[in-house]
Image: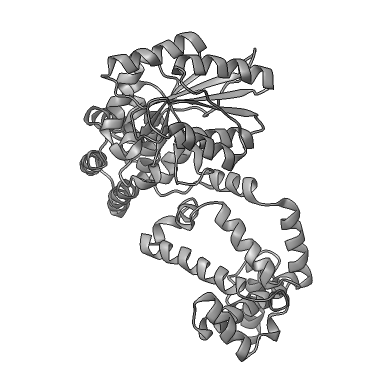
């Protein structure tokens, strides 16, 4: 997401940092390029104009031009302005004080409402809630069945009725949720155009009868300014509480995410970043601004790790590393933990200073490499995973045939695993593995102070 914008902005910042001294003209030229980058990213024209005006007022001043690091000052100003543009705040869903909290999803046809309803239900359950999905889309064929399938995959109940109006279904569902002790109700309404008077009237009728606590528009990020325009129209007629942007991972420009808050005044609450049902993320403007500027997003990375990593398994892994008893089964488990956190390319971009170092093709190649390693290990017997040293030529050929690779690739994996174990053993024993940089914690004799003392002693001996 935001790949083209990130690349353009980083090019501008690189030029500014390369100046021996920043002047008002340098800054104006840089801001002109930033404005072009925003427009190319399909950001609303007025939004881009106001954004540049805001940055200009902060950047054209003695405190920036006379700063020791003016280039970094410009980056910080743009970062702060991006946060302001996308809206500050935390994407929380306030719980109702009496009865279940009702969330109504609305939007255009094909925007991904039904899938988003499932993702949101899964998100709420991971947060400790007890959600109920409501199939209120009686217009689209198979919409009810689709939601039921998603409910089965998530093990979350779906309320539906045959031959009933959407308004009645929503009202009955909320009553049922209260009786069953469900604290969250998600209404999946039919897709509709904002110019369809009859369908919009149905939405207002549901709103009047059920009185949902939160009303979210589900918009397709890949439609750019069309998503922004539809959000404005829906908000005018329904008074939305927030936006959920779908398919943000497929949008290299990001114009909708940058424009929608400024145009509608409503915050983006969540973003869909993949097809799987766990690929719904909270939208944090400060973190997203850091990602756009290529600064990473460590907080989100840590949160993903906390959600997916089994702490008991992690403790057991640490103990195995300490005792040097790590095997290929453990290695496979670690790869699976990483995969649960999401695509490798997304994880790399969350690491400050690292995501921009790799081309998209290289990151895709990393995904393929992980898949190849998993296939090789899965083709091994339990004995071979436990004791890789028993794998000889005939076993290597069998493993290679079973995983669809060449025998030398199996050899390469075994060699790399052996080297990794050896390196970990050196670390845990306090010895320095070859090539480890100075100052690595826990490596005996590697501190910068120790090296300086030894250099001083050698100089004295030479004298």
Q: Residue at x 68, y 72 (%)?
A: 424
Tell me the quadrant of the picture where the C terminus can be found: bottom right
Quadrant hosting residue 262: top left
Residue 431 in the image, given as x and y percentages of width and height: 71, 75
Residue 221 falls left or right of residue 144: left
* Residue at image coords 53%, 85%: 407
Where in the figure is residue 436, as x and y percent of width and height?
60, 73
Which residue is most to the top? Answer: 208
Residue 455 in view here:
no
Give the image location of residue 93, x and y in percent.
Answer: 55, 24
Q: How is this picture coloured?
A: one colour
Say whether residue 375 is left or right of residue 82.
Answer: right
Q: Nearer the viewer, residue 36 or 343?
A: 343
Q: Is residue 235 above or below residue 79?
A: above
Q: Residue furthest front?
A: 163
Q: Nearer the viewer, residue 250 or 434?
A: 250
Left or right of 450 on screen, residue 65: left
> Residue 56: x, y in percent?
28, 32
The residue under the point 39% across, 42% down is: 248
* Residue nearest the viewer, comparing 355 with 121: 121
Is residue 90 at all visible to an observer of this figure? yes
In the image, farthest residue toward the bottom: 393
- Residue 460 position by quadrant: bottom right
Q: Which is more toward the observer, 399 or 219?
A: 399
Residue 326 shown left or right of residue 68 in the figure:
right
Instruction: Tell me the residue at 61%/80% (across/down).
Output: 414
Q: How many marks?
A: 0
């Amino acid at each position: 997401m935001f790949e083209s914008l990130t690349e353009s902005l980083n090019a501008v910042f690189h030029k500014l940092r390369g100046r021996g001294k920043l002047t008002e003209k340098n800054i104006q030229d840089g801001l002109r390029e930033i404005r072009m980058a925003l427009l190319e990213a399909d950001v609303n024209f007025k939004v881009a104009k106001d954004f540049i005006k805001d940055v200009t007022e902060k950047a054209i001043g003695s405190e920036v031009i006379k700063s020791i690091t003016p280039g970094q000052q410009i980056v910080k100003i743009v970062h702060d302005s991006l946060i302001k543009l996308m809206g500050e705040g935390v994407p929380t869903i306030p719980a109702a004080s009496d009865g279940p909290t009702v969330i109504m999803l609305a939007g255009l046809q094909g925007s991904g409402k039904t899938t988003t309803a499932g993702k949101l239900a899964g998100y709420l359950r991971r947060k400790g809630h007890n959600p109920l999905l409501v199939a209120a889309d009686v217009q689209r064929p198979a919409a009810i069945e689709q939601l039921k399938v998603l409910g089965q995959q998530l093990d979350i109940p779906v309320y539906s009725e045959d031959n009933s109006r959407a308004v009645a279904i929503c009202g009955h569902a909320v009553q049922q949720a209260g009786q069953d002790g469900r604290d969250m109700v998600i209404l999946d309404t039919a897709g509709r155009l904002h110019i369809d008077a009859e369908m919009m009237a149905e939405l207002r009728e549901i709103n009047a009868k059920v009185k949902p606590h939160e009303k979210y528009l589900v918009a397709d990020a890949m439609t750019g300014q069309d998503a922004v325009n539809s959000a404005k129209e829906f908000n005018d007629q329904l008074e939305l509480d927030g936006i959920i942007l779908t398919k943000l991972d497929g949008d290299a420009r990001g114009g909708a995410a940058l424009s929608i808050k400024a145009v509608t005044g409503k915050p983006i609450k969540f973003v869909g970043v993949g097809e799987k049902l766990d690929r719904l993320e909270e939208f944090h403007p400060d973190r997203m601004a850091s990602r756009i500027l290529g600064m990473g997003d460590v907080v989100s990375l840590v949160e993903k790790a906390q959600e997916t990593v089994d702490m008991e398994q992690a403790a057991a892994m640490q103990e195995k590393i300490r005792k040097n008893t790590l095997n290929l089964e453990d290695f496979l488990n670690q790869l699976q933990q990483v995969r649960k956190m999401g695509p490798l390319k997304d994880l790399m971009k969350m690491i400050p200073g690292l995501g921009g170092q790799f081309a998209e093709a290289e990151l895709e190649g990393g995904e393929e490499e992980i898949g190849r390693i998993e296939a090789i290990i899965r083709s091994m017997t339990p004995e071979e995973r436990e004791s890789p040293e028993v794998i000889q030529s005939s076993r290597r050929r069998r493993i290679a045939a079973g995983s669809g690779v060449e025998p030398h690739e199996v050899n390469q994996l075994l060699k790399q695993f052996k080297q990794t174990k050896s390196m970990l053993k050196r670390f845990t024993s306090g010895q320095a593995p070859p090539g480890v940089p100075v100052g690595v914690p826990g490596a005996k004799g590697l501190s910068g102070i120790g090296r300086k003392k030894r250099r001083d002693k050698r100089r004295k001996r030479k004298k």
